[in-house]
Every structure is written in C-alpha cells, then in structure tokens.
Image: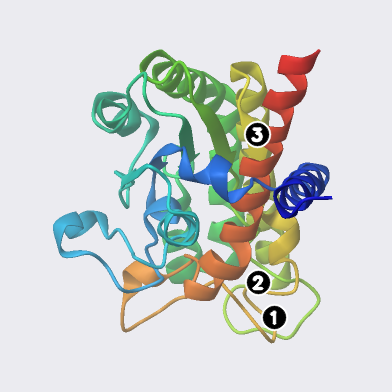
Amino acid sequence: MTRSRTLSLLAGVLSATLAVLGLASPAQAAGHHYVALGDSYASGVGAGSYTTESGACKRSTKAFSALWAAANAPASYKSVACGGAKTTDVINSQVAALSAQTTLVSITIGGNDAGFGTIMSTCALQGSSACIAAVDAAQVQARANLPGLLDRAYAAIRSKAPNAKVVVLSYPVFYQLGTVCLGIGEAARAKVNEGINLADSLIAAAAARAGFTFADVRGIFVGHQICSGNKWIHSVDILNLSNSYHPMATGQSLGYLPVFTQAVGQSATAKKAGAKA
C-alpha cells in the first residue's frame, strides 16, 4: 500500500471517528463564517479580559465563542453579543452582522426579557420572601410573553442567515442545593432554580420550532454552581456588581465551550446525514 493511500485511509478513519463522536473536523470548522449573538452570557460578562472595542457590551476574549474561534480558526468570526441585550436588541441591531454567507451562529438570549437581573437584585437586597414572589411573578410573565419574543428573534436570525447552523445555548441553573450557603435561604434558591429551568424549557421549545440546535449547559454546570465547593458562577460580587450571577472564565471554558463545540459537531454530522438520505 502506498504512503498516500495509507494517509487517505487514516484521514477517512479520523473523519468517521469524529462523526461518531459528534465533533467537527478541523476542515469543517475552518470553513465556517461564524457570528456570535446574544446577551451577557454570550459576550462573556464575568470572565474578564474585555475588548476595548466592545465598550459597555463587555465582550471577553475568554467568552466561549472567542475560545472556539481561537481553537478552530474559522474562515471568519465576529461577536456582536452585548451585556444587557434582549430579543429586541437581537432583532434591531445584532442580526445586521449576519448574511447569506454566515454558516454558524450561536446565541444566548431571553434571560433579560424574563427579568433575570431584576429578580436577582430583589433576591440579594430584599431577602427570601421577596425573592420567591419575584420569581413567581416572572414565571407568569415568561409563560405569556417569552415564546413569542423568542420566535420573532429566531425568525429574524433565519431571515438574515438562511444557510447557517444556529446553536441556541441555555442558561446554567444558579444554585447547588442542600449545602450551607450565605445569602438567601434554601427555598428561595430552589425557586430561582425553578425559574431558570422554566426559561430554559421555553427557550428549548422555541429553538425546536425554529429548527435550531439547542445546546443545554445545565448538566455540565452541576457541581459547579453557586454554593458548591468549585463554582463556575459568580455569586454577588460587591466589588464588581456586573459580575454577579454570571459565569466566571472557568464557566465559559469548561462549561459553555465544550457544550457548544459538541453542538457544532452534531449539527455538521446531522447535515451530512441529511444529504445522504
């Protein structure tokens, strides 16, 4: 067998192995024109190392999208994610970065529409009873309004990037329960987790309606939540309040990045399978 034939066979085996594992090959990743959209969880608030050009949006070089781009060298990469963004911001400003040439999009959105920031401020400042009431009220509003808001944002993405794989990432559940922990009580922590799970379920359903890939980070964050011994999420940060309840750099690199990487590979594999069918 010639050396070139041997190398070809090895390349074929590697490609097949990557497909089975649901991971994109370097060649697949290199061909992507990638745009990252979304809110503070996408921009990397809490991870530090913010780019000068991003200003108040706080786009971090340690955000999962930047880490993925650095590791995979796509044909192009741009993040327009911005701390504080809502679905209307995606529609009115962020989708302008997309085009028919865009082949990969990531997004976390919906948390600000559901009032995450206000809820957590209430929990931190007013205590457990007020926290539970705030989450209950937010859940009523989320069920009524969030599906429609997400549908409109996802439709805008598909309209601007008709050829792209779109990966929608969830939010991590904040608290590890059953531990001794400063701050709000166990019942309030459980209620916050309940609210996040509801938001994630509504986001997953909207992603499915749009035909997008839903990438759920909740599992990988288990054991690394607030009140754990090895947390990847900031609790209340008195010295830098904007960090509060956001992933640390470890949450981006060890939590969001591997989940996104796997989702990109699964998308590529599914596309190939569909082409053969």
Residue pointed to by mark 2: 225
Query: Are discs 1 and 2 less than 8 Å apart at CB?
Result: yes
Q: Secondary structure at mark 3?
A: helix
Q: Residues within 10 Å of mark 3 (few under 14, many from 20)?
A: many
The residue at 53%/45% (across/down) is: 29
Q: Residues within 10 Å of mark 2 (few under 14, many from 20)?
A: many
Disc 1: which residue: 228
Answer left or right for 53 relative to 36. Answer: left
Q: Which color mode does the image show?
A: rainbow
Disc 3 marks a residue whose amino acid type is Ala
**Is mark 2 in CB contact (under 8 Å) with mark 3?**
no
Q: Secondary structure at mark 2?
A: loop
Query: CA separation, marks 1 and 2?
Result: 6 Å
Quadrant of residue 180 within the rendered picture: bottom right
The three-letter amino acid code for the residue at tag 1 is Ser
First along the sequence among labels 2 and 3: 2
Whether residue 118 is visible: no
- Disc 2 versus disc 3: nearer the observer: 3
At a point 41% along the width and 68% down the height, the residue shown is 62
Number of other residues with Cα within 10 Å of mark 1, as a class: few under 14, some 14 to 19, many 20 or more: some
Q: Residue at x 51, y 64 (%)?
A: 123
Q: Closer to the camera, 159 or 185?
A: 159
User: Split into 4 quadrants, where in the image is the C terminus?
Assistant: top right
| Horizontal and vertical percent position of residue 148 | 51, 18
Residue 34 percent coordinates (x, y)? 41, 39
Q: CA distance from mark 2 to mark 3?
A: 31 Å
Query: Dot 3 corresponds to which residue?
Result: 268
Residue 235 in the image: state x and y as whole percent. Answer: 51, 75
Label 1 vs 3, first from the N-terminus: 1
Q: Given this view, does label 1 or label 3 mark the residue nearer the observer?
A: 3
At x 69% / y 46%, what residue is drawn?
197
